[in-house]
Amino acid sequence: MGRIGNSVELAKSSWKVIQADRELLVLPIISGIASVIVGASFLIPLVAAGGLGGDTGSYIVLFLMYVALAYVTIFFNAALVSAAHERLNGGDPTLASALAGARARAGKILPWAIVSATVSIILRAIEERAGALGRIVAGLAGVAWAVVTFLVLPVIVIEGIGVTGAIKKSGELFRRTWGENLAAQVGFALLGFLAVLPGIALIIATAFVGGGVLVAGILFGVLWMIGVAVVLSAMSVVFQTALYHFAVDGAVASSYFSNETMAAAFAPKSGGRTSGFGGGFAGN
Protein backbone atom coordinates (compact mmCIF):
# COMPACT_ATOMS: atom_id res chain seq x y z
CA MET A 1 0.00 0.00 0.00
CA GLY A 2 1.34 3.43 -0.95
CA ARG A 3 1.91 6.28 1.46
CA ILE A 4 -1.30 8.13 0.52
CA GLY A 5 -3.32 4.92 0.53
CA ASN A 6 -1.99 4.07 3.96
CA SER A 7 -2.91 7.52 5.27
CA VAL A 8 -6.42 7.15 3.85
CA GLU A 9 -6.87 3.82 5.63
CA LEU A 10 -5.64 5.30 8.91
CA ALA A 11 -8.03 8.22 8.46
CA LYS A 12 -10.93 5.83 7.79
CA SER A 13 -10.08 3.86 10.93
CA SER A 14 -9.93 7.05 12.99
CA TRP A 15 -13.29 8.12 11.57
CA LYS A 16 -14.84 4.78 12.61
CA VAL A 17 -13.89 5.54 16.21
CA ILE A 18 -15.39 9.03 15.93
CA GLN A 19 -18.59 7.58 14.44
CA ALA A 20 -18.95 5.34 17.49
CA ASP A 21 -18.80 8.40 19.76
CA ARG A 22 -19.93 11.38 17.69
CA GLU A 23 -20.72 13.42 20.77
CA LEU A 24 -16.97 13.70 21.30
CA LEU A 25 -16.81 16.09 18.35
CA VAL A 26 -18.13 18.65 20.82
CA LEU A 27 -14.71 18.66 22.51
CA PRO A 28 -12.79 20.39 19.66
CA ILE A 29 -15.67 22.87 19.34
CA ILE A 30 -15.55 23.72 23.05
CA SER A 31 -11.77 23.96 22.79
CA GLY A 32 -12.02 26.48 19.96
CA ILE A 33 -14.63 28.60 21.76
CA ALA A 34 -12.66 28.49 25.00
CA SER A 35 -9.49 29.52 23.15
CA VAL A 36 -11.23 32.57 21.70
CA ILE A 37 -12.52 33.56 25.14
CA VAL A 38 -9.13 33.05 26.78
CA GLY A 39 -7.32 34.98 24.04
CA ALA A 40 -9.80 37.85 24.29
CA SER A 41 -9.51 37.95 28.10
CA PHE A 42 -5.79 38.65 27.71
CA LEU A 43 -5.73 40.82 24.58
CA ILE A 44 -8.64 43.16 25.32
CA PRO A 45 -7.22 44.46 28.65
CA LEU A 46 -3.75 44.62 27.08
CA VAL A 47 -4.98 46.75 24.17
CA ALA A 48 -7.11 48.88 26.49
CA ALA A 49 -4.01 49.58 28.57
CA GLY A 50 -2.12 50.90 25.56
CA GLY A 51 -1.25 47.81 23.58
CA LEU A 52 2.12 46.15 23.21
CA GLY A 53 4.71 48.63 24.39
CA GLY A 54 7.62 46.24 24.24
CA ASP A 55 7.99 46.39 28.02
CA THR A 56 8.59 43.39 30.25
CA GLY A 57 5.03 43.42 31.57
CA SER A 58 3.55 43.07 28.09
CA TYR A 59 5.80 40.14 27.27
CA ILE A 60 4.86 38.43 30.53
CA VAL A 61 1.17 38.82 29.70
CA LEU A 62 1.71 37.43 26.21
CA PHE A 63 3.63 34.47 27.62
CA LEU A 64 0.84 33.75 30.08
CA MET A 65 -1.63 33.96 27.21
CA TYR A 66 0.40 31.44 25.20
CA VAL A 67 0.45 29.07 28.18
CA ALA A 68 -3.28 29.48 28.80
CA LEU A 69 -4.12 28.85 25.15
CA ALA A 70 -1.81 25.83 25.06
CA TYR A 71 -3.42 24.48 28.23
CA VAL A 72 -6.94 24.81 26.81
CA THR A 73 -6.01 22.99 23.61
CA ILE A 74 -4.04 20.28 25.41
CA PHE A 75 -6.75 19.75 28.04
CA PHE A 76 -9.49 19.04 25.49
CA ASN A 77 -7.11 16.93 23.40
CA ALA A 78 -6.36 15.00 26.59
CA ALA A 79 -10.09 14.40 26.97
CA LEU A 80 -10.17 13.00 23.43
CA VAL A 81 -7.16 10.80 24.16
CA SER A 82 -8.90 9.48 27.26
CA ALA A 83 -12.08 8.76 25.28
CA ALA A 84 -10.21 7.11 22.40
CA HIS A 85 -8.23 5.01 24.88
CA GLU A 86 -11.48 3.87 26.50
CA ARG A 87 -13.08 3.04 23.13
CA LEU A 88 -10.03 1.15 21.82
CA ASN A 89 -10.07 -0.93 24.99
CA GLY A 90 -13.69 -1.94 24.48
CA GLY A 91 -15.34 0.75 26.59
CA ASP A 92 -18.11 3.20 25.75
CA PRO A 93 -16.82 6.72 26.50
CA THR A 94 -19.03 9.72 27.12
CA LEU A 95 -18.34 13.43 27.34
CA ALA A 96 -18.35 13.09 31.11
CA SER A 97 -15.84 10.24 31.16
CA ALA A 98 -13.62 12.01 28.59
CA LEU A 99 -13.51 15.22 30.63
CA ALA A 100 -12.97 13.23 33.83
CA GLY A 101 -9.95 11.58 32.21
CA ALA A 102 -8.49 14.99 31.34
CA ARG A 103 -9.20 16.39 34.80
CA ALA A 104 -7.40 13.44 36.37
CA ARG A 105 -4.22 14.56 34.56
CA ALA A 106 -4.79 18.32 34.88
CA GLY A 107 -1.72 18.81 37.07
CA LYS A 108 0.53 16.95 34.63
CA ILE A 109 -0.93 18.74 31.60
CA LEU A 110 0.10 22.17 32.91
CA PRO A 111 3.88 21.55 32.71
CA TRP A 112 3.42 20.22 29.16
CA ALA A 113 1.47 23.38 28.25
CA ILE A 114 4.29 25.53 29.64
CA VAL A 115 6.92 23.58 27.69
CA SER A 116 4.84 23.71 24.48
CA ALA A 117 4.23 27.45 24.80
CA THR A 118 7.90 28.13 25.53
CA VAL A 119 9.07 26.14 22.51
CA SER A 120 6.53 27.90 20.27
CA ILE A 121 7.70 31.32 21.44
CA ILE A 122 11.36 30.43 20.92
CA LEU A 123 10.72 29.11 17.41
CA ARG A 124 8.68 32.20 16.50
CA ALA A 125 11.44 34.48 17.81
CA ILE A 126 14.02 32.66 15.67
CA GLU A 127 11.73 32.89 12.66
CA GLU A 128 11.11 36.61 13.05
CA ARG A 129 14.63 37.75 13.91
CA ALA A 130 16.84 35.61 11.68
CA GLY A 131 15.29 36.30 8.29
CA ALA A 132 14.94 33.61 5.63
CA LEU A 133 17.52 31.37 7.29
CA GLY A 134 15.68 31.70 10.59
CA ARG A 135 12.41 30.65 8.98
CA ILE A 136 14.06 27.54 7.56
CA VAL A 137 15.75 26.67 10.85
CA ALA A 138 12.58 27.31 12.86
CA GLY A 139 10.53 25.27 10.40
CA LEU A 140 12.87 22.28 10.57
CA ALA A 141 13.15 22.54 14.35
CA GLY A 142 9.37 22.75 14.64
CA VAL A 143 8.90 19.62 12.54
CA ALA A 144 11.52 17.73 14.56
CA TRP A 145 9.91 18.81 17.84
CA ALA A 146 6.43 17.80 16.64
CA VAL A 147 7.67 14.35 15.60
CA VAL A 148 9.67 13.67 18.76
CA THR A 149 6.82 14.78 21.04
CA PHE A 150 3.95 13.30 19.01
CA LEU A 151 3.12 10.73 21.68
CA VAL A 152 3.73 12.89 24.75
CA LEU A 153 0.03 13.52 25.43
CA PRO A 154 -1.06 9.86 25.22
CA VAL A 155 1.85 8.94 27.50
CA ILE A 156 0.78 11.57 30.05
CA VAL A 157 -2.94 10.71 29.89
CA ILE A 158 -2.67 6.92 29.77
CA GLU A 159 0.41 6.31 31.91
CA GLY A 160 0.14 9.32 34.18
CA ILE A 161 3.85 10.15 34.13
CA GLY A 162 5.33 13.66 34.20
CA VAL A 163 6.29 15.79 31.23
CA THR A 164 10.03 15.00 31.37
CA GLY A 165 9.43 11.26 31.35
CA ALA A 166 6.72 11.61 28.72
CA ILE A 167 9.01 13.53 26.35
CA LYS A 168 11.77 10.96 26.86
CA LYS A 169 9.45 8.03 26.20
CA SER A 170 7.86 9.69 23.16
CA GLY A 171 11.34 10.26 21.73
CA GLU A 172 12.28 6.63 22.35
CA LEU A 173 9.15 5.33 20.64
CA PHE A 174 9.80 7.46 17.57
CA ARG A 175 13.59 7.14 17.38
CA ARG A 176 13.58 4.54 14.60
CA THR A 177 10.27 5.31 12.96
CA TRP A 178 9.93 9.07 12.71
CA GLY A 179 10.17 9.12 8.92
CA GLU A 180 7.13 7.01 8.22
CA ASN A 181 5.10 8.49 11.04
CA LEU A 182 5.87 11.93 9.70
CA ALA A 183 4.63 10.71 6.31
CA ALA A 184 1.38 9.60 7.95
CA GLN A 185 0.94 13.02 9.57
CA VAL A 186 1.61 14.75 6.25
CA GLY A 187 -0.98 12.45 4.71
CA PHE A 188 -3.56 13.60 7.25
CA ALA A 189 -2.71 17.22 6.44
CA LEU A 190 -3.15 16.50 2.72
CA LEU A 191 -6.52 14.90 3.37
CA GLY A 192 -7.51 17.97 5.34
CA PHE A 193 -6.49 20.24 2.47
CA LEU A 194 -8.56 18.21 0.01
CA ALA A 195 -11.53 18.21 2.38
CA VAL A 196 -11.67 22.03 2.64
CA LEU A 197 -11.58 22.51 -1.14
CA PRO A 198 -15.39 22.29 -1.54
CA GLY A 199 -15.78 25.15 0.94
CA ILE A 200 -13.21 27.25 -0.90
CA ALA A 201 -14.83 26.40 -4.24
CA LEU A 202 -18.25 27.48 -2.92
CA ILE A 203 -16.90 30.87 -1.81
CA ILE A 204 -15.14 31.43 -5.14
CA ALA A 205 -18.22 30.38 -7.15
CA THR A 206 -20.59 32.68 -5.26
CA ALA A 207 -18.11 35.57 -5.57
CA PHE A 208 -19.06 35.84 -9.24
CA VAL A 209 -22.71 36.30 -8.28
CA GLY A 210 -22.26 38.73 -5.41
CA GLY A 211 -24.92 40.14 -3.13
CA GLY A 212 -26.81 37.87 -0.78
CA VAL A 213 -25.60 34.79 -2.61
CA LEU A 214 -21.99 35.71 -1.85
CA VAL A 215 -22.81 36.24 1.84
CA ALA A 216 -24.51 32.83 1.97
CA GLY A 217 -21.60 31.26 0.10
CA ILE A 218 -19.07 32.71 2.52
CA LEU A 219 -21.16 31.62 5.51
CA PHE A 220 -21.61 28.03 4.35
CA GLY A 221 -18.06 27.84 3.03
CA VAL A 222 -16.59 28.96 6.35
CA LEU A 223 -18.89 26.62 8.29
CA TRP A 224 -17.78 23.76 6.06
CA MET A 225 -14.11 24.49 6.69
CA ILE A 226 -14.70 24.80 10.44
CA GLY A 227 -16.49 21.44 10.36
CA VAL A 228 -13.57 19.86 8.52
CA ALA A 229 -11.12 21.30 11.05
CA VAL A 230 -13.18 19.92 13.96
CA VAL A 231 -13.45 16.43 12.47
CA LEU A 232 -9.80 16.26 11.44
CA SER A 233 -8.69 17.50 14.85
CA ALA A 234 -10.62 14.70 16.55
CA MET A 235 -9.44 12.10 14.03
CA SER A 236 -5.82 13.15 14.51
CA VAL A 237 -6.05 12.65 18.28
CA VAL A 238 -7.69 9.24 17.79
CA PHE A 239 -4.88 8.25 15.42
CA GLN A 240 -2.33 9.55 17.93
CA THR A 241 -3.85 7.35 20.65
CA ALA A 242 -3.98 4.28 18.42
CA LEU A 243 -0.38 4.87 17.41
CA TYR A 244 0.61 5.00 21.06
CA HIS A 245 -1.03 1.62 21.69
CA PHE A 246 0.70 0.11 18.69
CA ALA A 247 4.04 1.57 19.72
CA VAL A 248 3.79 0.26 23.27
CA ASP A 249 1.88 -3.01 22.82
CA GLY A 250 2.76 -3.98 19.24
CA ALA A 251 -0.94 -4.06 18.34
CA VAL A 252 -4.17 -2.10 18.69
CA ALA A 253 -6.58 -4.30 20.63
CA SER A 254 -9.72 -3.30 18.74
CA SER A 255 -11.47 -3.89 15.44
CA TYR A 256 -11.22 -0.24 14.44
CA PHE A 257 -7.60 -0.27 13.28
CA SER A 258 -5.85 -2.82 11.10
CA ASN A 259 -2.57 -3.82 12.69
CA GLU A 260 -1.16 -4.44 9.20
CA THR A 261 -1.91 -0.84 8.24
CA MET A 262 -0.43 0.42 11.49
CA ALA A 263 2.67 -1.68 10.88
CA ALA A 264 3.08 -0.01 7.50
CA ALA A 265 3.18 3.36 9.29
CA PHE A 266 6.05 2.07 11.40
CA ALA A 267 8.03 0.46 8.61
CA PRO A 268 11.63 1.75 8.20
CA LYS A 269 11.99 4.03 5.23
CA SER A 270 15.10 2.36 3.88
CA GLY A 271 17.04 -0.81 4.32
CA GLY A 272 13.99 -3.02 3.97
CA ARG A 273 11.56 -4.18 6.59
CA THR A 274 12.75 -6.09 9.55
CA SER A 275 10.74 -8.89 11.00
CA GLY A 276 8.37 -8.13 13.82
CA PHE A 277 7.14 -4.79 14.96
CA GLY A 278 8.60 -2.08 12.73
CA GLY A 279 12.22 -2.97 13.55
CA GLY A 280 11.63 -2.55 17.28
CA PHE A 281 11.62 0.37 19.69
CA ALA A 282 14.11 1.43 22.27
CA GLY A 283 12.84 1.03 25.76
CA ASN A 284 10.31 -1.72 25.01
Image (cartoon, rainbow, N blue to C red):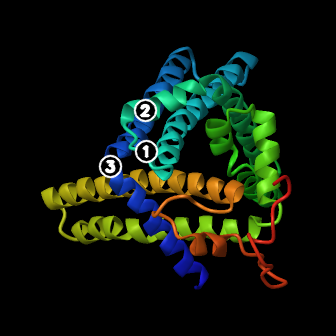
Return the x and y of residue 170 as percentages of the image width and height.
76, 49
Residue 179 lies in quadrant: bottom right
Label 3 amino acid? Arg
Which label lies toward us, 1 or 2?
1
Q: Secondary structure at mark 3?
A: helix
Q: Residue at x 67, y 32 (%)?
A: 160
- Disc 1 + disc 2, Cβ < 8 Å: yes
Q: Nearer the viewer, residue 239 or 190?
A: 239
Q: Which residue is mark 2?
A: 97
| 88 relative position to 129: left or right | left
Q: CA distance from mark 2 to mark 3?
A: 14 Å
Q: Which residue is mark 1?
A: 91
Residue 122 is at least partly visible in this image: no
Tell me the mark number nearer the camera, choosing from 2 and 3: 2
Quick one: label 1 or label 2, which is nearer the N terminus?
1
Residue 177 is situated, as x and y percent measured from the top left of the image, at: 76, 66
